[in-house]
Image (spheres, rainbow, N blue to C red):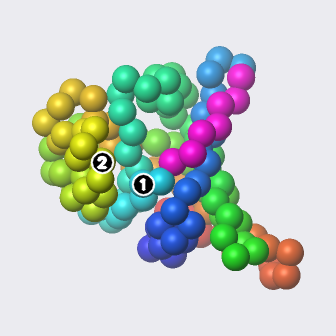
Amino acid sequence: MEEVCKFLKDAQTYYLATMDGDQPRVRPFGTAEIFEGKLYIQTGKSKDVSKQIAANPKVELCAFMNGTWLRLSGILVRDERLEAKVHMLDAYPSLKAMYSAEDDNTEVLYFKDASAVFSSFSAAPKTIRF
């Protein structure tokens, strides 16, 4: 899991796919943090992506860097605990201009039943499950 988180941080931007009914939706994200042994991301509850995850928590993300790409699929689980929100906002202080751990908008989610596949054109795929 640490390798997956490092790749996402180093790539800086990854693309998260959700479902909106029968329509796939993809958008850029940039948060990835390990907290209490789980890989977390962050968004706002007021965003469409939050509503899509609530309706169908199965997601996939993709990041690309230096000829290698990562595809991570799994189920996102909302964590309402203040400690999880504080941890994420402390890791990404620039988000504090838009979010607060105490507001009702900040949403942190962790991956459950995750499968991460690192691929490139020059090496065999490597799979990590957590």
| Vertical placement of residue 51 versus 32, above or below | above
Which numbered dot is residue 95? 2
For badge 1, the amino acid type reads Thr
For badge 2, the amino acid type reads Leu
From the top left corner, tell me how far across and down residue 7 is, in percent: 54, 71
From the top left corner, tell me how far across and down residue 57 is, in percent: 51, 34
Task: Kindly report which numbered mark, 1 or 2, lies closer to the viewer in this rendering.
Answer: 2
Inspect the magenta stretch and tell me whether residue 25 lies in it.
Answer: yes
From the top left corner, tell me how far across and down residue 41 is, in percent: 41, 50
Q: Please indicate whether residue 14 sits to the left or right of residue 105 in the image.
A: right
For the stretch drawn in magenta, what is the main secondary structure? strand
- In the picture of the structure, the residue carrying the numbered disc 1 is 31
The CA span between labels 1 and 2 is: 10 Å
Q: Which span is picked out in magenta?
A: 23-29
Q: Nearer the viewer, residue 95 or 19?
A: 95
Which numbered dot is residue 96? none
